[in-house]
Amino acid sequence: MESVRSILVVRLSSIGDIILTTPVVRRLRSRWPEARIDFCTRESFQPLLADSPYISALYTPETLPAGSSYDLVADLQNNGRSRRLLKDVEAGRLVRYRKGNWKKWLLVHLKLDLYGEAPSVVDRYQASLSEFGVADDDTGCELFVPESDRAYAESVLPGGTRVLAVCFGARHFTKRWPPERFAEAIRSVLGAFPSLRVVLLGGEEDAPHAMEIMQRLGEVPPGSVENLAGRCTLMQTAALLRRSSAVLTNDTGLMHMASAFGLRLFVLFGSSSEAFGFLPYRSTYELFEVRGLRCRPCSHIGRDRCPKGHFRCMREISSERVAARLSLFFRGGFA
Protein backbone atom coordinates (compact mmCIF):
# COMPACT_ATOMS: atom_id res chain seq x y z
CA MET A 1 0.00 0.00 0.00
CA GLU A 2 2.40 2.66 -1.26
CA SER A 3 -0.01 5.52 -1.94
CA VAL A 4 -1.29 6.62 1.47
CA ARG A 5 -2.33 10.25 1.59
CA SER A 6 -4.54 10.26 4.68
CA ILE A 7 -4.36 8.34 7.98
CA LEU A 8 -6.59 8.31 11.05
CA VAL A 9 -5.29 6.94 14.35
CA VAL A 10 -7.85 6.23 17.08
CA ARG A 11 -6.95 5.86 20.76
CA LEU A 12 -9.61 7.38 23.00
CA SER A 13 -8.00 6.89 26.43
CA SER A 14 -6.07 6.99 28.73
CA ILE A 15 -2.89 8.96 29.52
CA GLY A 16 -0.45 6.07 29.39
CA ASP A 17 -2.10 4.30 26.48
CA ILE A 18 -2.08 7.47 24.39
CA ILE A 19 1.58 8.19 25.16
CA LEU A 20 2.36 4.62 24.09
CA THR A 21 0.93 5.42 20.63
CA THR A 22 3.48 8.19 20.04
CA PRO A 23 6.22 5.92 18.62
CA VAL A 24 3.70 4.51 16.14
CA VAL A 25 2.56 7.98 15.03
CA ARG A 26 6.19 9.03 14.55
CA ARG A 27 6.88 5.93 12.46
CA LEU A 28 3.78 6.51 10.35
CA ARG A 29 5.07 10.02 9.61
CA SER A 30 8.47 8.58 8.66
CA ARG A 31 6.83 6.04 6.35
CA TRP A 32 4.57 8.59 4.66
CA PRO A 33 6.12 12.06 5.18
CA GLU A 34 3.52 13.87 3.05
CA ALA A 35 0.41 12.14 4.41
CA ARG A 36 -2.26 13.81 6.48
CA ILE A 37 -2.23 12.09 9.88
CA ASP A 38 -5.23 12.79 12.12
CA PHE A 39 -5.70 11.49 15.64
CA CYS A 40 -8.98 10.94 17.50
CA THR A 41 -9.01 10.90 21.29
CA ARG A 42 -11.09 12.25 24.16
CA GLU A 43 -10.90 16.00 24.70
CA SER A 44 -9.26 15.72 28.13
CA PHE A 45 -6.27 13.92 26.60
CA GLN A 46 -5.74 16.14 23.57
CA PRO A 47 -3.06 18.29 25.27
CA LEU A 48 -0.78 15.23 25.17
CA LEU A 49 -0.71 15.44 21.38
CA ALA A 50 -1.50 19.08 20.63
CA ASP A 51 2.13 20.07 19.89
CA SER A 52 3.20 16.91 18.09
CA PRO A 53 4.85 17.78 14.75
CA TYR A 54 3.67 14.46 13.34
CA ILE A 55 -0.08 15.06 13.69
CA SER A 56 -2.07 17.12 11.22
CA ALA A 57 -5.32 17.48 13.19
CA LEU A 58 -6.87 16.31 16.44
CA TYR A 59 -10.48 15.21 16.79
CA THR A 60 -12.69 13.96 19.58
CA PRO A 61 -15.37 11.30 19.01
CA GLU A 62 -17.85 14.19 18.98
CA THR A 63 -15.98 16.35 16.44
CA LEU A 64 -14.77 13.71 13.98
CA PRO A 65 -16.84 14.53 10.87
CA ALA A 66 -19.31 11.83 9.91
CA GLY A 67 -18.48 10.42 6.53
CA SER A 68 -14.76 11.20 6.83
CA SER A 69 -12.60 9.30 4.39
CA TYR A 70 -9.07 7.99 4.97
CA ASP A 71 -6.75 5.73 3.04
CA LEU A 72 -5.69 4.03 6.27
CA VAL A 73 -7.38 3.87 9.68
CA ALA A 74 -5.56 2.39 12.70
CA ASP A 75 -7.91 1.55 15.57
CA LEU A 76 -5.52 1.29 18.50
CA GLN A 77 -8.41 1.25 20.99
CA ASN A 78 -10.40 -1.63 19.53
CA ASN A 79 -13.42 -1.61 21.79
CA GLY A 80 -17.13 -1.10 21.32
CA ARG A 81 -16.89 2.67 21.31
CA SER A 82 -14.13 2.89 18.73
CA ARG A 83 -15.92 0.38 16.51
CA ARG A 84 -19.15 2.38 16.65
CA LEU A 85 -17.24 5.56 15.92
CA LEU A 86 -15.60 4.07 12.84
CA LYS A 87 -18.87 2.87 11.34
CA ASP A 88 -19.26 6.45 10.11
CA VAL A 89 -15.74 6.64 8.64
CA GLU A 90 -14.83 5.46 5.16
CA ALA A 91 -11.54 3.58 5.30
CA GLY A 92 -9.51 2.30 2.37
CA ARG A 93 -7.87 -0.05 4.85
CA LEU A 94 -8.82 -0.55 8.49
CA VAL A 95 -6.47 -2.26 10.94
CA ARG A 96 -7.06 -2.96 14.61
CA TYR A 97 -4.75 -3.53 17.55
CA ARG A 98 -5.08 -7.12 18.73
CA LYS A 99 -5.54 -6.98 22.49
CA GLY A 100 -5.24 -10.69 23.17
CA ASN A 101 -7.83 -10.53 25.95
CA TRP A 102 -7.92 -14.31 26.13
CA LYS A 103 -4.25 -14.33 27.16
CA LYS A 104 -5.02 -11.80 29.88
CA TRP A 105 -7.88 -13.99 31.13
CA LEU A 106 -5.69 -17.08 31.26
CA LEU A 107 -2.95 -15.25 33.17
CA VAL A 108 -5.32 -13.63 35.69
CA HIS A 109 -7.60 -16.60 36.32
CA LEU A 110 -5.42 -19.67 35.68
CA LYS A 111 -1.96 -18.09 36.08
CA LEU A 112 -1.08 -19.47 32.66
CA ASP A 113 1.36 -17.14 30.92
CA LEU A 114 1.28 -17.41 27.12
CA TYR A 115 2.90 -14.04 26.48
CA GLY A 116 6.41 -15.42 26.12
CA GLU A 117 8.86 -12.51 26.07
CA ALA A 118 6.06 -10.07 26.96
CA PRO A 119 6.25 -7.59 24.09
CA SER A 120 5.40 -3.99 24.87
CA VAL A 121 1.97 -2.67 23.97
CA VAL A 122 3.84 -0.38 21.56
CA ASP A 123 5.11 -3.45 19.70
CA ARG A 124 1.56 -4.81 19.60
CA TYR A 125 0.30 -1.52 18.18
CA GLN A 126 3.13 -1.70 15.64
CA ALA A 127 2.23 -5.28 14.68
CA SER A 128 -1.15 -4.10 13.40
CA LEU A 129 0.73 -2.07 10.75
CA SER A 130 3.39 -4.63 9.86
CA GLU A 131 2.06 -5.26 6.33
CA PHE A 132 2.50 -1.59 5.39
CA GLY A 133 6.25 -1.36 5.85
CA VAL A 134 6.05 0.88 8.93
CA ALA A 135 9.52 0.34 10.36
CA ASP A 136 10.65 0.30 13.98
CA ASP A 137 13.00 3.24 14.65
CA ASP A 138 14.49 1.98 17.95
CA THR A 139 13.23 5.08 19.76
CA GLY A 140 10.80 5.40 22.65
CA CYS A 141 7.81 7.58 23.46
CA GLU A 142 7.74 11.34 22.90
CA LEU A 143 5.92 14.34 24.29
CA PHE A 144 6.23 17.91 23.04
CA VAL A 145 5.75 20.37 25.90
CA PRO A 146 4.57 23.92 25.08
CA GLU A 147 6.89 26.79 25.99
CA SER A 148 4.39 28.23 28.50
CA ASP A 149 4.34 24.97 30.45
CA ARG A 150 8.13 24.71 30.35
CA ALA A 151 8.34 28.24 31.75
CA TYR A 152 5.99 27.28 34.57
CA ALA A 153 8.13 24.27 35.44
CA GLU A 154 11.30 26.35 35.45
CA SER A 155 9.71 28.76 37.92
CA VAL A 156 8.91 25.85 40.25
CA LEU A 157 12.12 23.88 39.72
CA PRO A 158 15.01 26.24 38.87
CA GLY A 159 18.03 24.94 37.00
CA GLY A 160 20.71 23.14 39.00
CA THR A 161 18.18 21.59 41.37
CA ARG A 162 18.20 17.82 41.82
CA VAL A 163 14.60 16.65 41.82
CA LEU A 164 12.84 13.43 42.72
CA ALA A 165 9.35 13.34 41.23
CA VAL A 166 6.93 11.03 43.00
CA CYS A 167 3.94 9.74 41.01
CA PHE A 168 2.08 8.04 43.83
CA GLY A 169 -1.39 7.77 42.29
CA ALA A 170 -3.22 5.21 40.18
CA ARG A 171 -6.87 4.71 39.39
CA HIS A 172 -7.08 1.36 41.17
CA PHE A 173 -6.17 0.61 44.79
CA THR A 174 -4.13 -2.52 43.96
CA LYS A 175 -1.76 -0.46 41.79
CA ARG A 176 -0.96 2.06 44.56
CA TRP A 177 1.96 1.60 46.94
CA PRO A 178 0.65 2.58 50.40
CA PRO A 179 1.13 6.27 51.35
CA GLU A 180 3.11 5.34 54.46
CA ARG A 181 5.65 3.48 52.29
CA PHE A 182 6.09 6.52 50.06
CA ALA A 183 6.55 8.70 53.14
CA GLU A 184 9.14 6.31 54.59
CA ALA A 185 11.13 6.20 51.36
CA ILE A 186 11.04 9.98 50.87
CA ARG A 187 12.08 10.63 54.48
CA SER A 188 15.00 8.20 54.16
CA VAL A 189 16.28 9.71 50.90
CA LEU A 190 16.01 13.24 52.25
CA GLY A 191 17.94 12.13 55.32
CA ALA A 192 20.84 11.30 53.01
CA PHE A 193 20.32 14.20 50.59
CA PRO A 194 18.78 17.14 52.47
CA SER A 195 19.18 19.52 49.50
CA LEU A 196 17.09 17.29 47.25
CA ARG A 197 13.73 18.61 46.04
CA VAL A 198 10.79 16.20 46.06
CA VAL A 199 7.58 16.96 44.15
CA LEU A 200 4.38 14.96 44.51
CA LEU A 201 2.58 14.82 41.17
CA GLY A 202 -0.92 13.63 40.31
CA GLY A 203 -4.42 14.70 39.40
CA GLU A 204 -7.24 16.04 41.55
CA GLU A 205 -8.36 12.49 42.30
CA ASP A 206 -4.92 11.81 43.81
CA ALA A 207 -4.92 14.82 46.16
CA PRO A 208 -6.20 12.93 49.25
CA HIS A 209 -3.39 10.39 48.92
CA ALA A 210 -0.86 13.21 48.58
CA MET A 211 -2.15 14.77 51.78
CA GLU A 212 -1.71 11.45 53.58
CA ILE A 213 1.89 11.21 52.37
CA MET A 214 2.56 14.76 53.57
CA GLN A 215 1.04 14.01 56.97
CA ARG A 216 3.16 10.89 57.39
CA LEU A 217 6.49 12.47 56.41
CA GLY A 218 7.46 13.58 59.89
CA GLU A 219 10.59 15.70 60.13
CA VAL A 220 12.14 16.53 56.78
CA PRO A 221 14.12 19.61 55.69
CA PRO A 222 11.75 22.62 55.43
CA GLY A 223 10.47 23.15 51.89
CA SER A 224 12.04 19.96 50.59
CA VAL A 225 8.72 18.31 49.65
CA GLU A 226 6.13 20.13 47.56
CA ASN A 227 2.67 18.73 47.01
CA LEU A 228 1.51 19.70 43.50
CA ALA A 229 -1.12 16.99 43.10
CA GLY A 230 -4.27 18.45 41.60
CA ARG A 231 -2.64 21.87 41.20
CA CYS A 232 -1.16 21.51 37.71
CA THR A 233 -2.53 20.97 34.25
CA LEU A 234 -1.62 17.80 32.42
CA MET A 235 1.16 19.44 30.43
CA GLN A 236 2.45 21.42 33.42
CA THR A 237 2.88 18.03 35.09
CA ALA A 238 4.74 16.84 32.00
CA ALA A 239 6.98 19.90 32.15
CA LEU A 240 7.77 19.25 35.82
CA LEU A 241 8.65 15.64 35.04
CA ARG A 242 10.87 16.85 32.20
CA ARG A 243 12.95 18.87 34.71
CA SER A 244 13.22 16.03 37.23
CA SER A 245 16.29 13.89 37.85
CA ALA A 246 14.48 10.64 38.68
CA VAL A 247 10.94 9.41 39.18
CA LEU A 248 9.48 7.07 41.78
CA THR A 249 6.21 5.84 40.35
CA ASN A 250 3.36 3.39 40.50
CA ASP A 251 2.09 1.74 37.32
CA THR A 252 0.26 4.82 36.09
CA GLY A 253 -0.03 7.16 33.13
CA LEU A 254 2.56 9.52 34.61
CA MET A 255 5.07 6.67 34.50
CA HIS A 256 4.74 6.62 30.71
CA MET A 257 4.81 10.40 30.64
CA ALA A 258 8.15 10.36 32.46
CA SER A 259 9.49 7.69 30.10
CA ALA A 260 8.97 10.12 27.20
CA PHE A 261 11.75 12.30 28.66
CA GLY A 262 14.29 9.51 29.13
CA LEU A 263 14.31 9.81 32.92
CA ARG A 264 15.55 7.20 35.36
CA LEU A 265 12.42 5.46 36.62
CA PHE A 266 11.91 3.49 39.81
CA VAL A 267 8.73 1.53 39.16
CA LEU A 268 6.39 -0.13 41.68
CA PHE A 269 4.23 -3.01 40.44
CA GLY A 270 1.59 -4.51 42.73
CA SER A 271 -1.25 -6.31 40.99
CA SER A 272 0.35 -5.38 37.66
CA SER A 273 2.35 -7.86 35.61
CA GLU A 274 5.06 -7.08 33.09
CA ALA A 275 3.45 -9.72 30.85
CA PHE A 276 0.67 -7.26 29.98
CA GLY A 277 3.20 -5.05 28.18
CA PHE A 278 2.94 -1.81 30.14
CA LEU A 279 6.47 -1.41 31.45
CA PRO A 280 8.20 1.84 30.44
CA TYR A 281 9.00 1.63 26.75
CA ARG A 282 12.68 1.89 25.83
CA SER A 283 13.41 3.85 28.97
CA THR A 284 15.79 3.06 31.82
CA TYR A 285 13.92 1.72 34.84
CA GLU A 286 14.24 -0.46 37.89
CA LEU A 287 11.23 -2.61 38.74
CA PHE A 288 10.15 -3.33 42.33
CA GLU A 289 7.69 -6.18 42.72
CA VAL A 290 6.98 -9.17 44.94
CA ARG A 291 7.68 -12.25 42.90
CA GLY A 292 6.22 -15.67 43.61
CA LEU A 293 2.79 -14.58 44.87
CA ARG A 294 0.28 -17.12 43.56
CA CYS A 295 -2.50 -14.53 43.58
CA ARG A 296 -0.65 -12.13 41.29
CA PRO A 297 -1.81 -10.74 38.90
CA CYS A 298 -5.36 -10.56 40.23
CA SER A 299 -6.51 -8.30 37.38
CA HIS A 300 -5.18 -6.90 34.13
CA ILE A 301 -6.24 -3.35 35.02
CA GLY A 302 -6.29 -3.29 38.84
CA ARG A 303 -8.90 -3.63 41.56
CA ASP A 304 -10.49 -1.36 44.16
CA ARG A 305 -9.45 -3.74 46.93
CA CYS A 306 -7.19 -6.73 47.44
CA PRO A 307 -9.36 -9.82 46.83
CA LYS A 308 -7.29 -11.77 49.37
CA GLY A 309 -7.30 -9.02 51.98
CA HIS A 310 -3.55 -9.05 52.63
CA PHE A 311 -2.28 -6.77 49.82
CA ARG A 312 1.10 -8.46 50.01
CA CYS A 313 1.97 -7.49 46.43
CA MET A 314 2.44 -3.89 47.56
CA ARG A 315 2.94 -4.10 51.31
CA GLU A 316 5.95 -6.39 50.94
CA ILE A 317 7.83 -3.98 48.69
CA SER A 318 10.31 -2.62 51.21
CA SER A 319 10.59 1.14 51.57
CA GLU A 320 14.15 0.61 52.82
CA ARG A 321 15.12 -1.15 49.58
CA VAL A 322 13.46 1.47 47.41
CA ALA A 323 15.17 4.27 49.36
CA ALA A 324 18.52 2.51 49.11
CA ARG A 325 18.27 2.29 45.32
CA LEU A 326 17.19 5.92 45.03
CA SER A 327 20.06 6.98 47.26
CA LEU A 328 22.51 5.03 45.15
CA PHE A 329 21.26 6.87 42.09
CA PHE A 330 21.62 10.30 43.69
CA ARG A 331 25.12 9.37 44.88
CA GLY A 332 26.02 8.77 41.23
CA GLY A 333 26.16 5.01 41.58
CA PHE A 334 24.29 4.36 38.31
CA ALA A 335 25.90 4.47 34.91
Image: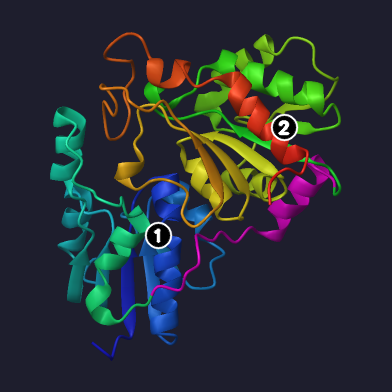
Q: Residue at x 73, y 31 (%)?
A: 198
Figure coloring: rainbow
Depth check: give the residue in front, 35 or 319: 319
Is 261 located above or below residue 225 in the figure? below
Q: Secondary structure at mark 2?
A: helix
> What residue sits right under mark 2 in the picture?
327
Quarter of the image where one finds residue 293: top left
In this rendering, position of residue 29 left or right of residue 81: right
Q: Give the residue type at disc 1.
A: Thr
- Seen at 37% across and 28% down, the residue is 291
Which residue occupies the foreground of this view, 330 or 69?
Answer: 330
Q: How far across and down, in percent of the image, does residue 296 sit?
A: 29, 26
Name the one closer to the observer, 218 or 42: 218
Question: Does the rendering let one see residue 69?
Answer: no
307 magenta-colored: no
Q: Residue at x 54, y 72 (%)?
A: 53
| Magenta residue check for 148 | yes
Label 1: how many Cα within 10 Å (few below 14, some 14–19, many 20+): many
Quadrant including the N terminus: bottom left
**Position of 258 compared to 150: left or right?**
left
Above or below residue 327? Residue 99 is below
Residue under numbered circle 1? 21
| In the rendered image, the vertical position of residue 105 relative to residue 127, given as above or below | above
Mark 1, secondary structure of its residue: loop
Segment tinted magenta in the rendering: 136-158
Q: CA distance from mark 2 to mark 1?
A: 33 Å
Q: Amino acid at mark 2?
A: Ser
Residue 54's x, y, as percent?
49, 73
Viewer-nearest residue: 141 or 66: 141
Residue 38 position in % (x across, y down): 38, 70
Q: Is residue 210 left or right of residue 329?
A: left
